[in-house]
Image (spheres, coloured by chain):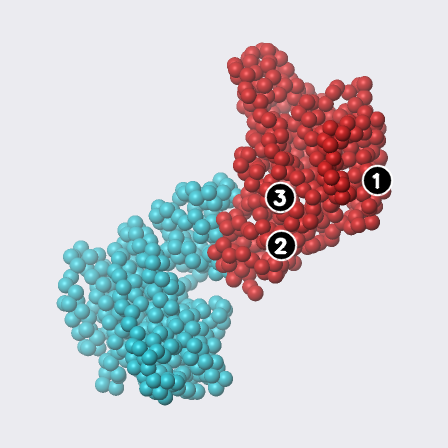
Chain colours: A red, B cyan
Amino acid sequence: MNAVTLLKKKRSGERLTKEELTFFINGFTKGEIPDYQMSAFLMAVYFKGMTAEETADLVNIMEYSGDVVDLSKLKLPKVDKHSTGGIGDKTTLILAPLLASCGIAYPTIAGRGLAHTGGTIDKFEAIPGFKCFLPLKRFEELVNTVGLAFIGQTAELCPADKKIYALRDVTATVESIPLIVASIMSKKLAEGIDAILFDVKTGSGAFMKTEKEAEELSKALVSTAKAAGKFATAMITDMSEPLGHAVGNANEVNECMAFLRQGPQDAPPEKRLYELTMELAVELYSLAEQQRGNKRPNKTAVKELLEEALKSGKAYSKFLEIVSLQGGDTNALDEGLPLASKIVPFIAEKKGFIGSMNGETIGMALVELGGGRRKTSDKIDHSVGFWFDKFVGDSVKKGEVIAQIYAKDAKTAEIARKMLESAIEITIEAPSKAKLIRKTI
Amino acid sequence: MNAVTLLKKKRSGERLTKEELTFFINGFTKGEIPDYQMSAFLMAVYFKGMTAEETADLVNIMEYSGDVVDLSKLKLPKVDKHSTGGIGDKTTLILAPLLASCGIAYPTIAGRGLAHTGGTIDKFEAIPGFKCFLPLKRFEELVNTVGLAFIGQTAELCPADKKIYALRDVTATVESIPLIVASIMSKKLAEGIDAILFDVKTGSGAFMKTEKEAEELSKALVSTAKAAGKFATAMITDMSEPLGHAVGNANEVNECMAFLRQGPQDAPPEKRLYELTMELAVELYSLAEQQRGNKRPNKTAVKELLEEALKSGKAYSKFLEIVSLQGGDTNALDEGLPLASKIVPFIAEKKGFIGSMNGETIGMALVELGGGRRKTSDKIDHSVGFWFDKFVGDSVKKGEVIAQIYAKDAKTAEIARKMLESAIEITIEAPSKAKLIRKTI
């Protein structure tokens, strides 16, 4: 077996055997197959795709390229949600403690944000003292005892994915369904979960701009997860405007706190954030029930049960418990994380309706504020961000505040304000509002 | 401008501007763009191709990536022939002195053989003392004064091609028409020629197995050469059996000597080798006439003139002159270069006709003898090879000699003999003989 022969096979659209894929992927991970052969392979896969069987093989090889989490001692069903990323997408911070407080384990190994999309690990790093990089053994312990934990991808976990992803990023081979599926699934399976829910975003703020692309990815993700013996659902959801009021790490954490706490001091959650989070939570609960061997439960009953976990404070306590165990300052969290001090309102220049909000531009405006990354090595400022008061379809008066900008100085605030101006369109007619949940697969 | 953006453009099938190609190719040559981005680019070109304009730009950028030969002081028309390579393909050694003896300059910068195909430089290195690696200035001097010279590709000539070719070889991106065209044309244009003849081989011993592929490549070569302001013709010629009796470097040089010398001690040239060489010579002469501003001459008249140059000994003297000036031992050449001493006949196991001869297998049998390369760094033995007495369509009796094997020992002779057995088919019915010159473009 040699790399050039396998490249020729893939180039001609022939399927590779598991043995051949193992030779190529493990050879690359060990440094025996050079970058330039892997990048030619990735480009060939971009053009020729992979069969369902090849994709499943690739997932399996990448999953076992390093250590895997062992949660076999834990008798609870173990679920996770994966979002393809968007603007203000913060549901993991709510879902994990909510499900864990209802007897469902929720191990999370998450990533950092890049370009216009945020990352869960960045949000946790906004909490003073919180440690995102724990050994896998400690992660297993926490999930076994508390039912949840949040860590970043360690060096031992899926090293093949880490190395391949870095190469895809610089060789224009990110946008390939089988490669996306392999990257997502290998990490999720290495987490030791039983069931998985994919939140596949579509719209201006999403990676998959069209619903067709989102559907193609959803189907590939669900079928690969099922082929690996997992319960799985994909929901195609709207990302044509920010999800919730807050964008920016500390700001988003504060919004999640208010959601979980539901205290007298807290404003009710933003409508779409609430609706999506509860839909995802109900689906995760149902997947867990299937894993227990039960039938899919009644949706209304599950929703009531989850709402009770929020109202009673169980979900909030669960969150504080894990934050505390991972070294985070729960007092700071309860008081609200501090935001950047230069606050500039973004106001409507004319009367009308919010016609559209370009998610990608809003995400890049956060990068300009210092709250996101251009390249993976960038440091970020957790305190900057936006708080949106208006969303698509809302009417605005001239001079009314659409959003607050939290910046470190006037200069970056002004850059961000200009970007919001180009991102947010005010129309005379009320626009049609995009459906939040487009499809369930 | 950045590499990933250009990769995305190429990946989507958009055409790149000359500025963009310059950025990419020169960046790679200088080491600023890494191998892995170039290999992704090459694979994208493999799938998406290049327009005629992009190919011409690529040729130009690669041509000027290093030094170019300056033959502007020489008033003679300057021609060259490029063969896509085959088994026993030795016409350059005859054409160059033949044309040069008729007042047409013939500068040759040639390559080494790899896998089943031979290389012109290897044949010259079979001549004791012959120096293939001269500075470009010396090459110019020789062509200016003698009308021909033979050198290998130096480090200063087309460094972009050298670096890109090495990468194509290990990333399964050799078989791409625009990349093949760019590699051939950049080197030929850097030679300082006015007109070029492409001998595009088709059949079992050729790189392009089918006539369709050969025609596609021929058209691309001719149109790119014309776009660069050169007179150009392509001939698609048969490579479904060895060209001439001899295969193996010293053996082939000896066959060329006999062809050029036409002495009483020399057997007449093999029919197809003679026919093809003369057709190529006539076409080169005609291209030179066009370069001089004349009409295409009468073919029969040109052929007579060329035959006279052979009979008179002018062509032979020209060859000895350049060999001597490049340090080669002309006595050794005239006496015949020594061949390997283990001579084993390959005999017909049954009565019938030579039905087919698999060129690729015969080429690989030469590699097994030590006369060809598996990888570019392999050393080769010039004395080994084959002498074919029979060709496709010839009748054979049981026990009759089809070829002689010249090996360094009995072991490699036996390996080669077994390979000839699988390469040469004996049929009951006489096969239809492939036409030697398939098409002229």
| Residue A337 in picture, x, y percent from top left | 77, 27
- Asked whether B203 or B311 is in front, the reply is B203
Q: Is residue B262 visible?
A: yes
The chain identifier of the residue carrying mark 1 reads: A
The lab-note entry on whether marks 3 and 2 share a chain reads yes
Residue at the image point whose x is 25% and y is 86% from the top: B265
Give the mark toward the camera: 2 or 1.
2
Badge 3 vs badge 1, beta-carbon distance below 8 Å: no
Pointer 2 or 1: first along the chain: 2
Is B416 drawn above or below residue A90 in the view shown? below
The chain identifier of the residue carrying mark 3 reads: A
Residue at the image point whose x is 79% and y is 23% from the top: A262
Q: Residue furthest front?
A: A295
The amino acid type found where label 3 is placed reads: Leu
Helix, strand or loop at label 1? It is: helix
Quarter of the image containing the C terminus of chain A?
top right
The amino acid type found where label 2 is placed reads: Asp
Task: Name the quadrant containing residue A402.
Answer: top right
| Residue B56 in picture, x, y percent from top left | 35, 49
| Residue B93 in picture, x, y percent from top left | 31, 72
The amino acid type found where label 1 is placed reads: Val
Kindly identify which residue carries mark 2: A57
Q: Label 2 crowding class (10 Å Cα cut-off): few <14, some 14-19, many 20+?
A: many
Helix, strand or loop at label 2? It is: helix
Kindly identify which residue carries mark 3: A221
Q: Which mark is residue A146?
A: 1
Helix, strand or loop at label 3? It is: helix
The lab-note entry on whether marks 3 and 1 share a chain reads yes
Residue at the image point whose x is 62% and y is 51% from the top: A56
